[in-house]
Image (cartoon, grey):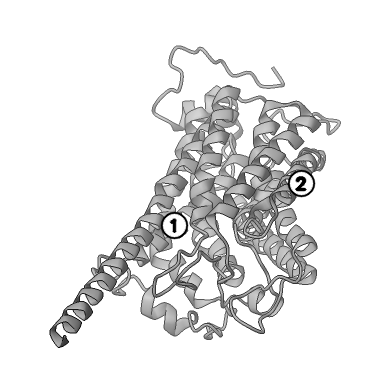
């Protein structure tokens, strides 16, 4: 009998070990797969921006996007990841209530020479988590990239992208997208799918840059009226937007904490980054309903295929902050309302003399704020954190969070771009803009047989 009990105990231990190994592999694979899915976002931005550019600028639009992605990776490795863990409670670097923040914690897990920042057979999560956050960072730079096409200097753009992707957005994420973040612990801020900490930050950073960058030549007439500067390939732009939508599934997967690991909130169910319970099933309902509401809303208002597909993206951004909470018809309505408002916001910005080539401020900045605020309108009273006797989501908390995201994006974007402007590193010379950036900056031609000649409004 004793031998049988010992044998059963041994088998049970082996079974537990096997289950743990299987779950660990699943968790590692889950986050690993978010990365190639999010790369689709960048394939989409690449096609989207090249198509939205005139043919004389198509390759330069693509090159700056690819280079920004590549430059952000090492900066995020050396600095960005450390910022996320060091500053959730504010700039003091003190430890938060969950004990997963502050200078000491960040030094232990996120300094470049830490055992967790490279191959380590006993650590199966750090690399894939870091990789997912790198792709979030690169997404912010791609949002900026679209608004400034056809007239920004490559050097200036890369500097702005690094500031945004490796410093600004990740500090905002530490404050509002971390269980120890002061916006979360003090105000109950909830932003599951990063409507604020990615989209609003990047949209308002872009607005600050656009004010200093100025409009493209020929965009505005002497009386202030605006001309439409069409890109050379609407089909490429539409395909690019659909690829961004496909990549958004990886983006939202990266916001989920899977169960059953030492760092998980639960052993049985998925959770948000705040520890609040959710499921992939519920998220799927809401992503698709927000997507559909966005397309229908934008199409009803504009009948424009560009805004229709921008509406698909805008619908998901509108729902993203609370996509773990919504009843599906609510997600549809939120996406629909956001997409209906989006073209009017873009027109308002244009009437202020600001040339946002792809509507980045309206789609990401405005709808990012809408996504955050609507959580305060429709989801007040839900627990904002894991545990008992915790702070709850409130309209005031969401409004404060939205204001922080807008200011946190706009001020660095405006200040850094102003410094670059004063140094002569923000905008290309007039002659280069008129000839086309591909001709003067790129040793290749997008269309060597000249099947897509570019025509300026003035011509």
The quadrant of the rendering that contains the N terminus is bottom left
- Most distant residue in the left direction: 3
Return the x and y of residue 402 as percentages of the image width and height.
72, 63
Nearest the camera: 426 or 87? 87
Mark 2–mark 1 Cα distance, whole angstroms, equals 29 Å
Give the residue at mark 2. Answer: 333
Provide the secondary structure element on which disc 2 rests.
helix
**x, y percentage for residue 228?**
73, 26
According to the picture, the residue beneath numbered tag 1 turns out to be 132
Residue 53 locus on image (x, y percent): 58, 29
Examine the rendered structure and indicate whether residue 435 appears above or below residue 68: above
Q: Residue placed at 37% from the left, 80% from the top?
A: 108
| Of the two numbered discs 2 and 1 in the rendering, the one whose residue sits closer to the viewer | 2
Q: Secondary structure at mark 1?
A: helix
Give the camera-side residue of 401 and 347: 401
Q: Splitting the image into 4 quarters, where does residue 200 fall? A: bottom right
Q: Is residue 358 visible?
A: no
Say which quarter of the image contains residue 5: bottom left
Q: Residues within 10 Å of mark 1 (few under 14, many from 20)?
A: many
Q: Which of 271 and 358 lies nearest the eye of the viewer?
A: 271
Seen at 26% across and 67% down, the residue is: 18
Residue 127 at x, y = what percent?
35, 62
Q: Residue at x 49, y 80 (%)?
A: 101
Mark sitting on residue 161: none
Q: How many marks?
A: 2
């Amino acid at each position: 009998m004793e031998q049988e009990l010992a044998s059963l105990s041994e088998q049970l231990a082996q079974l537990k070990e096997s289950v743990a190994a299987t779950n660990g592999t699943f968790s590692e694979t889950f986050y690993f797969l978010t990365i190639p899915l999010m790369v689709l976002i960048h394939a989409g931005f690449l096609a989207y921006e090249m198509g939205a550019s005139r043919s004389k600028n198509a390759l330069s639009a693509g090159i700056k996007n690819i280079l920004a992605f590549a430059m952000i990776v090492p900066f995020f490795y050396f600095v960005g990841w450390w910022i996320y863990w060091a500053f959730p409670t504010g700039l003091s670097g003190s430890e938060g209530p969950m004990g997963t923040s502050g200078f000491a914690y960040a030094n232990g897990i996120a300094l470049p020479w830490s055992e967790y920042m490279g191959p380590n057979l006993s650590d199966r999560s750090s690399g894939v988590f870091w990789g997912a956050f790198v792709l979030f960072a690169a997404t912010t730079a791609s949002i900026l990239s679209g608004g400034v096409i056809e007239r920004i200097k490559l050097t200036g753009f890369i500097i702005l992208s690094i500031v945004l992707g490796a410093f600004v957005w990740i500090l905002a994420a530490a404050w509002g997208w971390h269980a120890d973040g002061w916006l979360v612990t003090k105000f109950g801020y909830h932003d599951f799918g990063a409507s604020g900490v990615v989209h609003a930050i990047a949209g308002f950073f872009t607005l600050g840059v656009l004010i200093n960058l100025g409009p493209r030549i020929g965009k505005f007439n002497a009386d202030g009226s605006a001309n439409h500067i069409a890109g050379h390939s609407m089909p490429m732009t539409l395909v690019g937007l659909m690829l961004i939508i496909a990549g958004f599934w990886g983006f939202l997967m990266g916001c989920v904490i899977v169960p059953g690991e030492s760092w998980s909130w639960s052993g049985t169910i998925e959770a948000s980054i705040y520890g609040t319970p959710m499921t992939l099933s519920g998220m799927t309902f809401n992503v698709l309903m927000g997507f559909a509401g966005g397309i229908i809303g934008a199409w009803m208002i504009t009948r424009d295929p560009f805004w229709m597909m921008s509406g698909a993206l805008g619908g998901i951004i509108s729902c993203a902050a609370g996509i773990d909470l919504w009843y599906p018809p609510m997600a549809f309505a939120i996406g629909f309302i956001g997409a209906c408002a989006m073209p009017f916001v873009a027109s308002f910005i244009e009437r202020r003399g600001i040339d946002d080539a792809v509507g980045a401020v309206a789609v990401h900045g405005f709808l990012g704020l809408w996504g955050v605020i609507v959580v305060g309108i429709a989801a007040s009273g839900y627990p904002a954190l894991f545990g008992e006797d915790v702070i709850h989501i409130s309209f005031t908390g969401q409004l404060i969070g939205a204001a922080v995201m807008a200011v946190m994006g706009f001020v660095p974007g405006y200040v850094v771009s102003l410094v670059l402007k004063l140094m002569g590193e923000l905008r290309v010379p007039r002659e280069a803009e008129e000839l086309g950036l591909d001709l003067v900056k790129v040793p290749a031609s997008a269309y060597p047989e000249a099947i897509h000649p570019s025509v300026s409004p003035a011509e």
